[in-house]
Image (cartoon, rainbow, N blue to C red):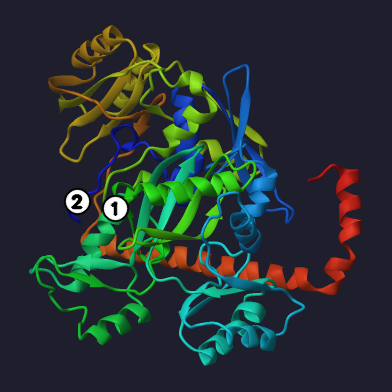
């Protein structure tokens, strides 16, 4: 795939509202798949032990109901989740399995151990090594490929004191590429790797221009809309080491890497590598589920030595994000949302999938504002849609006309939208399960009300998803390149500020929990929860 395109699965194209993008990709797409098959969908609020609001959802066929958080359904037990939540516990289960799963050798240290204890153990190891928290997430506090004891000595206090991680692991560094592999039951669904932020030269544009073009593509990918490449000190330093500047024009097909780490939040790319998985690597991933009780579906991070067909498990995730698999920047998209619904509601496998989608932003609003604890999404009948794209020309941009179009669609139980265009035409997207109703609507639009003169209708088939119900869209306003660049910068800054704030809160929370007062009052909090019924 070239970097000038992004491949959608047809039933997802344009069907992921802003609230369903980024970190809520799994929460939206899994629910959408079930809803499109005619299942009852409910979103509801959940408050964790720190009173932070989380969004959960349930799907029901009227006889059975399953509950989900992100990509994880209730088929994954709490025991399995707790095991996966602690890296050292996970390794113990994998080592002690009937068929042991390969993991890096190392040791766990808690708050009773001093920094000197860790360094003493490090002296018995062969460098390079990895130092990381037992329960880190999104790479927080993880330092790989540490080359010397001196380097480790500087990292230890940063992770333990500044970031506030009490339990840490020191283990062997295993070279190779890191694969994220997703498994359900005894079946591997797919795998991806992450590539550090980069641009692909075309022999004509500068690195700065290529970054802008790459960001424009990323903004069309619902998994990466707020994960853009921002030119910062790290990128400038990386280019300088290579002898490049932002004004450098790379050769055609030359890939210029902008960062060392492959974090998607810093501009990295998800690349599908499912077809590169050997039977041996698949067996290793499947044996993980057999080693951990109650783990029905999961993701494994595996370092792969492709030359020797070997893999070592880094960690196991009970609720892996699906975004990079559903919307990879390169390779074949994998429909994991479909697989999850097939698993929990196998009786719906052969049902027709509707191509309607719902307004996730509106659904979340009352939950986020705490004006409602749950929202039921209107249940639909999963039937094929018959759609049309209409461009009405003539004297059509007239007050009241769009509302008239909306009423005609509403009377015929049709879905879509109407929108005035800059060229004086009116765009209508309309779809419904009744083909005759759609055709009657088209004829009605051509005739129009008395105060509108429709001279012609450009009529085309519409085979893309359509939002449920019918709405009036405001006129589009095209951004200039300067405005677009400014908008990208604003989104990047917001994302960076949120990530920084999140890291600060996590560190602060961990320091608070490490205090003696917190540990001493643990029994009182348990009694309070029992009395109040709060979880």
Residue 225 sits above or below residue 508 on the image: above
Whether residue 80 appears in this view of the structure is yes
Label 2 SS: loop
**Residue 2 on image: x %, y %:** 17, 54
Res. 163 mark = none
**Tag 2 residue:** 1
At horizontal 39% and vertical 40% (from top left) the residue drawn is: 16
Front residue of 194/503: it is 194
At horizontal 19% and vertical 51% (from top left) the residue drawn is: 1
Label 1 SS: loop
**Residue 493 on image: x %, y %:** 43, 67
Residue 169 sits above or below residue 383 on the image: below
**Whether label 1 touches label 2, CB < 8 Å:** yes
At horizontal 21% and vertical 11% (from top left) the residue drawn is: 443
Front residue of 227/283: it is 283
**Residue 74 on image: x %, y %:** 63, 36
Front residue of 35/286: it is 286
Mark 1 surroundings within 10 Å by alpha-carbon count, few (fewer than 14), some (14 through 19), many (20 or more): many
**Tag 1 residue:** 329
Of the two numbered discs 1 and 2 on the same chain, state the one appearing first in sequence.
2
Whether residue 359 appears in this view of the structure is no
Is 55 left or right of 340, judged from the image as shown?
Answer: right
């Amino acid at each position: 795939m070239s970097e000038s395109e992004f491949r959608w699965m047809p039933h997802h194209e344009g069907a992921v509202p802003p609230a369903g993008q980024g970190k809520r990709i799994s929460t939206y797409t899994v629910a959408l798949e079930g809803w499109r098959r005619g299942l009852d969908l409910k979103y509801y609020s959940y408050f964790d032990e720190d009173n932070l609001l989380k969004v959960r959802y349930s799907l029901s066929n009227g006889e059975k109901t399953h509950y989900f958080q992100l990509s994880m359904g209730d088929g994954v037990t709490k025991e399995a989740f707790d095991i996966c939540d602690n890296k050292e516990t996970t390794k113990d289960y994998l080592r002690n399995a009937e068929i042991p799963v390969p993991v890096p050798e190392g040791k766990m240290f808690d708050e009773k151990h001093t920094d000197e204890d860790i360094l003493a153990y490090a002296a018995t190891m062969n460098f390079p090594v990895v130092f990381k928290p037992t329960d880190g997430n999104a790479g927080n506090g993880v330092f790989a490929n540490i080359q010397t004891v001196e380097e480790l000595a500087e990292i230890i206090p940063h992770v333990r004191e500044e970031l506030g991680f009490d339990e840490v692991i020191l283990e062997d560094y295993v070279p190779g590429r890191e694969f994220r592999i997703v498994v359900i039951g005894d079946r591997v669904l797919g795998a991806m790797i992450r590539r550090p932020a980069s641009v692909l030269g075309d022999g004509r544009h500068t690195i700065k221009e290529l970054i802008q073009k790459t960001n424009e593509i990323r903004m069309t990918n619902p998994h990466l809309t707020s994960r853009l490449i921002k030119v910062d000190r790290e990128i400038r330093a990386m280019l300088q080491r290579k002898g490049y500047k932002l004004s450098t024009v790379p050769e055609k097909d030359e890939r210029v890497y902008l960062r060392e780490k492959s974090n998607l939040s810093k501009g990295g790319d998800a690349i599908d590598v499912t077809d590169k998985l050997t039977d041996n690597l698949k067996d290793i991933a499947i044996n993980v589920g057999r080693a951990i009780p109650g783990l029905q579906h999961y993701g494994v991070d595996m370092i792969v030595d492709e030359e020797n067909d070997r893999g070592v498990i880094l960690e196991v995730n009970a609720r892996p994000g699906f975004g990079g698999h559903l919307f990879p920047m390169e390779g074949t998209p994998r429909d994991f949302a479909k697989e999850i619904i097939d698993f929990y509601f196998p009786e719906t496998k052969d049902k027709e999938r509707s191509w309607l989608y719902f307004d996730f932003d509106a659904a979340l609003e009352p939950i986020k504002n705490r004006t409602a604890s749950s929202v039921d999404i209107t249940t639909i009948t999963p039937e094929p849609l018959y759609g049309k794209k209409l461009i009405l020309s003539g004297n059509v941009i007239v007050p009241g006309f769009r509302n008239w179009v909306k009423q005609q669609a509403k009377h015929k139980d049709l879905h879509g939208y109407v929108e005035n265009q800059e060229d004086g035409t009116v765009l209508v997207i309309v779809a419904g399960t009744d083909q005759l109703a759609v055709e009657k609507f088209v004829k009605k639009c051509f005739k129009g009300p008395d105060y509108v003169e429709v001279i012609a209708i450009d009529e085309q088939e519409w085979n893309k998803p359509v939002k449920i119900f019918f709405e009036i869209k405001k006129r589009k306003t095209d951004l200039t390149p300067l405005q677009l660049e400014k908008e990208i910068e604003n989104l990047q800054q917001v994302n960076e500020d949120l990530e920084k704030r999140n890291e600060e809160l996590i560190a602060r929370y961990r320091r608070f929990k490490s205090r003696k007062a917190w540990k001493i009052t643990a029994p009182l909090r348990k009694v309070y929860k029992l009395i109040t019924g709060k979880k």
